[in-house]
Image: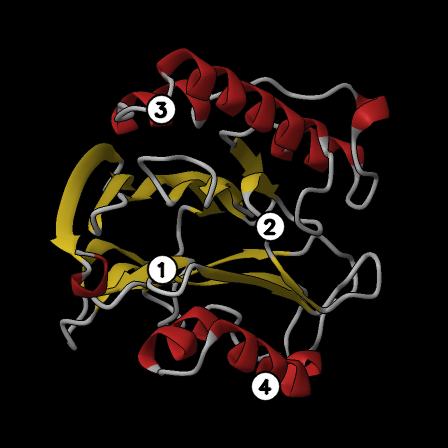
Amino acid sequence: MCIAGFIWDAHPEYPFLLLLNRDEYYSRPTKPLTWWECNRILGGRDGQAGGTWLACTRDGRVAFLTNVREISKLQDPKSRGELPVRFLEGTKSPIVFAEEILKEADQYNGFNLMLADLPTRTMIYVTNRPKDGNFVSKVPPGIHVLTNASLDTPWPKAQRLCNNFKELLDQYGEGELPIKELVEKLMTNTIKDEECLLPKIYPPEQEYYLSSIFVEADFPLGRYGTRSSSALSVKANGEVSFYEKYLYNGEWDDKTLIYQIEELK
């Protein structure tokens, strides 16, 4: 179901730094991090529906997505993974794209979509399941966590990630950060919550296994859990580093791809 923690416009070296775990059934076909056929979009890809949970472009656009935890589902919904792709393939600003998406938001199951344009330092959050009535909002500078509820909802796993993230940032100060070390220290956490702390949306025996940052579970539909851990960092000089640690054919592998956003040189 995914969890993401990120710094936005609040670090002198990194205008944007994102850590994201993607949780999915092991049986769902997935393509690991690579440049897509268009040679403009970089990210992993859902081999079933063709969308993505996290990707970026050469000109500094970023989009990532989590599902909203809910009981009610549409019978024939559109794939939520197409939303980041549509933004990345286009040229519309994050706010314009977000407002257009709302016109068809009822055709998707619950989603949280983050849209960023690095050259203009703009990030927009859009959801079709708003907690406070705001479908679209501008993301303020700071550290944020996105789980399967609204942005910065204080689920215990979100608070663990946020607090640990802040501690590591304080430890390393304002200089360069050890990205792989951040992934290992923050995104592999398997601490689970007591039943009284669960969101109480799904049955407790299911939510218990989903309450950790790193997920491993056997559900009736099959083996489920964290399939990849990603770190996407953008430096002030425009250098983008995309690291992905991913499960492939039962084994963990990783890769890092680096490129330059020309507009930020």
Residue under pointer 4: 100
Q: Cα distance, mark 4 to mark 3?
A: 38 Å
Residue under pointer 3: 174
Q: Cα distance, mark 2 to mark 1?
A: 14 Å
Dots 1, 3 in contact, CB < 8 A: no
Q: Cα distance, mark 1 to mark 3?
A: 20 Å
| Left or right for 13, reference 10 | left
Give the mark, 3 or 2, whose residue is nearer the N terminus.
2
Give the mark, 4 or 3, whose residue is nearer the N terminus.
4
Check disc 1 and report its element: helix, strand or loop. loop
Residue 134 picture quarter: bottom right
Which sits in the foreground, 144 or 189?
144
State which mark lies toward you, 4 or 2. Answer: 2
Check disc 3 and report its element: helix, strand or loop. loop
State which mark lies toward you, 1 or 3. Answer: 3
| Left or right for 39, reference 21 | left
Give the mark, 2 or 1, whose residue is nearer the N terminus.
1
Provide residue 239's location: percent of width, then percent of height.
Answer: 19, 48
Give the mark, 1 or 4, whose residue is nearer the N terminus.
4
State which mark lies toward you, 4 or 3. Answer: 3
- Quick one: label 4, few (<14), some, or many (20+) residues within 10 Å? few
Looking at the image, which residue is at 65% across and 48% down? Answer: 148
Q: Cα distance, mark 3 to mark 2?
A: 19 Å
